[in-house]
Image (cartoon, rainbow, N blue to C red):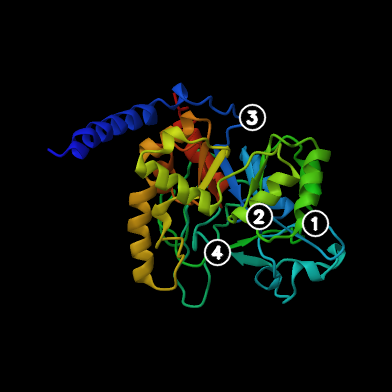
Amino acid sequence: MSPLLYYALPALGSYVMLSFFFLRRPRLLHTPWVPAFRPHLGAHRGGSGERLENTMEAMENSMAQRADLLELDCHLTRDGVVVVSHDKNLFRQTGVNRDVGSLNFEDLPLLKEELEVYFSPGKNVGCERWAAPTVVGSPPQPPASSSPLGPTPCPWALVPTPAILLPSFSPPPPGHFARGADRHMVRLEDLFRRFPQTPMSVEVKERNEELIHKIAGLVRHYDRNEITIWASEKSSIMKKCKAANPEMPTSFTLSRGFWVLLFYYLGLLPFISIPEKFLICFLPTIINRTYFPFSRSGLNQLAAVVAKWLIMRKSLIQHLQQRGVQVVFWCLNEESDFEAAFNLGATGVITDYPTALRCYLDSRGPPALAS
């Protein structure tokens, strides 16, 4: 044996053993973050599968289901109002081909009467499942016994329809559109006033320093530093967010998430510091089912296999949880995905259907905390 191997092999073996040891016991090296809140039920775009997305009505409906987190995106109007909207351009939501920033808040158009649910084409409102007769060119209608606006009670029920009976959470027919009585876009400040104690995740999609500073100022004004999460896919934007209000907890950006995965597989993760308090990540099982990141089906199938192999590691999730990093998976709308997320050790789930997730949680109890 060469002298190099004589020393390298024992050193490598010792490194692997130490990495594995501290991966399971990270608190021997790091003091975990103490969470201000634990979000088990997050409402995507305010609960966009049951009401029109990001409306006050959607938020109220989600809060009726005891949502722990409202997930929002924000943009700035021409007159400097922080408005809750997923898209920068209003065409998909309103039919008006104008950017949010080109209009004053009072001039923003109403939302369309119905909006397609992007991550779950075909799921109905609430715990109930229903099926209308299949008629070409005619969208399915809810059963007469259920209100399209009122929250659906738990436990799950079987609802008689003119066609058949379906159990809860059965596979949805394609093309679900959410509807609601409220079609008005809302200001972020209105939500802070209406839900002063409700945690919110605020995603910033564009490098707009005025928008970032206005969000930071509103959070300070309403004393929400501990319960409002900075979220962004881009590290350059997150850097500006943290500078504007460093007291707010942050979530991982895409590049930071990739680095964590790399450190995990290299065995370095137990030895690095993690400033983020939340990992808000898609669950790989939804790729090629309700989430299609690529236009070609073959690429989506490949992405599903690779992402599932890389991300769905229970030891990784448990390590982050023990360090106080809460793992929340989005955007899950099926019971099988709820089950997969919580079995991995996730703190919570972000869904378009808060009623369905509330029924699931109530039937199984709250997720176990990392020990």
Q: CA distance from mark 1 to mark 2?
A: 12 Å
Of tags 3 and 2, the one toward the viewer is 2
- Image point (64%, 39%), residue name: 249
Write down the residue under mark 4: 141
Q: Secondary structure at mark 4?
A: loop
Query: Upstream in the sequence, badge 3 or badge 1?
Result: 3
Query: Looking at the rendered structure, which numbered label has been put on residue 36?
Result: 3
Q: Which residue does the numbered mark 1 point to in the structure image? A: 210
Other residues around mark 3 within 10 Å, as few (<14) / some (14–19) / many (≥20): few
Quick check: 353 above or below 135? above
Query: Which three-letter amino acid code belongs to the residue tagged 2?
Result: Ile
Q: Looking at numbered disc 4 in the image, what kind of residue is underneath it?
A: Gln
* Residue at (62, 42) in percent of width and height: 250
- Within 10 Å of the Cα at label 4, are there few (<14), some (14-19), or many (20+) other Cα atoms? few
Q: Is residue 152 visible?
A: no
Mark 3: secondary structure: loop
Asked which secondary structure carries label 2, the reply is: helix
**In terms of secondary structure, where does tag 1 sit?**
helix
- The Cα atoms of the two marked residues, 3 and 2, are separated by 24 Å
Evaluate whether residue 205 shows in this view: yes
Mark 3 and mark 4: Cα distance apart in space = 42 Å
Q: Residue at x 45, y 28 (%)?
A: 368
Q: 10 Å neighbourhood of mark 2: few (<14), some, or many (≥20)?
A: some
**Residue with the most extreme left position:** 1
Which label is found at residue 237?
2
The amino acid on which the numbered mark 3 sits, given as a three-letter code, is Ala
Residue 167, percent across and down?
41, 49
Quadrant for the N terminus, please. Answer: top left
Tell which circle, 3 or 2, labels the residue nearer the N-terminal end: 3
Residue 39, picture quadrant: top right
Q: Amino acid at mark 1?
A: Glu
Disc with the residue nearer the chain's start (1 vs 4): 4
